[in-house]
Structures are given as structure tokens and as C-alpha cells.
Amino acid sequence: MISQCVTAKVPPGCGSNERGKAFFKPFLASTAAADQSKSDRISIGIASKVGQVELQPGEYKLVVDEPKVRFIELKTGKSLELDARVESGDRKFDSTKIHTQSVDGVSQSRQIRIGGTETRIAFD
């Protein structure tokens, strides 16, 4: 069994703007309570199984709405919803990383750590 950790690429146009964050922080805080689901963009470089579903390489929007996680392929709009365990780590992660294992020659995504947060998404 081979384990690896892949740093997810942030798609173009998704960079941070500190001044913009400061300006919108009160607005974001007030809307966060109304919309509990969180989303991030991730890039999958190689075909990988998540649970019993195989995701093809590409850009995805990852929507976390406990206990479900939805992968929306940006190119096609195709959506897949899976059960996942959302956990909180003891520190913020520096970057978004997808942790995979090779099982019988197939890449299995076991965990996604969301950069800039303490959020860890585990797939059993």
C-alpha cells in the first residue's frame, strides 16, 4: 500500500485579496450563519476513487454540507454527492491537500485538508 499527499492547485482567478477580505468580513460573518455549507475549489490531477465513486482529473467545486460532500465538476457541471466525516484539526492547514493511497493499483482519496482552515474531510 502506497500513501501520498498531493497539494491541490488553486484555479486562476481564485487568489486572495486581503483588502477585499477586510472589507467584506462583516458581510461574510453575517451570511455564514444563514448558509452553513462551505465550498472550495480543488484540482484533481489523476483519476482517483472517493468512496465507491471514481473522479476523473479536472477542476471541481467541493461543497461541504455535513454529513454530505458534493463534488461539482466545473467543466461539465456534473455533481456527485458522497457521505463524509468532517473533522476539525488542531491547527490551520497551509494549503489544500488531497491524501491518497494506492490500493491494488487504484488511487483512493482518503482525506482532503482544506488550506487556510482546520477542516479535514475523511472518506471511509
Image (spheres, rainbow, N blue to C red):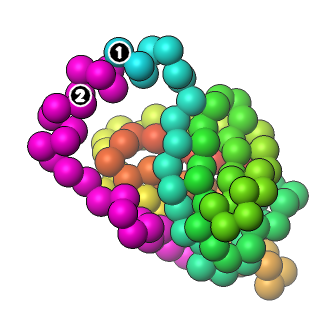
Q: Which residue is drawn at 53% across and 23% down?
A: 36
Q: For the residue labelled by badge 1, is the local secondary structure a helix, a strand or a loop?
A: helix
Specify the farthest residue to the bottom: 105
Q: In this view, does 34 lie above or below 24?
A: above
Question: Residue 117 occupies which quadrant of the picture?
Answer: top left
x, y percent for residue 61: 59, 53
Q: Is residue 27 above or below residue 79?
A: above
Which residue does the numbered mark 1 point to in the structure image? 30
Question: Residue 74 occupies which quadrant of the picture?
Answer: bottom right
* 50 part of magenta stretch: no
The crowd level at tag 1 (other Cα within 10 Å; few <14, some 14-19, many 20+) is few
x, y percent for residue 118: 39, 40
Q: Mark on residue 25? A: 2
x, y percent for residue 97: 47, 63
Specify the farthest residue to the left: 19
Q: Residue at x 70, y 30 (%)?
A: 67
Upstream in sequence: badge 1 or badge 2: 2
Q: Which residue is drawn at 32% across and 48% down?
A: 116
Question: Residue 99 occupies which quadrant of the picture?
Answer: bottom right
The crowd level at tag 2 (other Cα within 10 Å; few <14, some 14-19, many 20+) is few
Question: The disc labelled 1 sits on which kind of residue?
Answer: Ser
x, y percent for residue 21: 21, 39
3 or 94: nearer the eye? 94
* 8 part of magenta stretch: yes
How far, Cα to Cα, is label 1 from label 2? 9 Å
Question: The disc labelled 2 sits on which kind of residue?
Answer: Lys
| Left/right of residue 25 with respect to residue 74 in the rendered view | left
The N terminus: image quadrant = bottom right
Q: In this view, does 117 lie above or below 60?
A: above
Please report the bounds of the magenta region as a residue range: 1-29
Q: For the residue labelled by badge 2, is the local secondary structure a helix, a strand or a loop?
A: helix
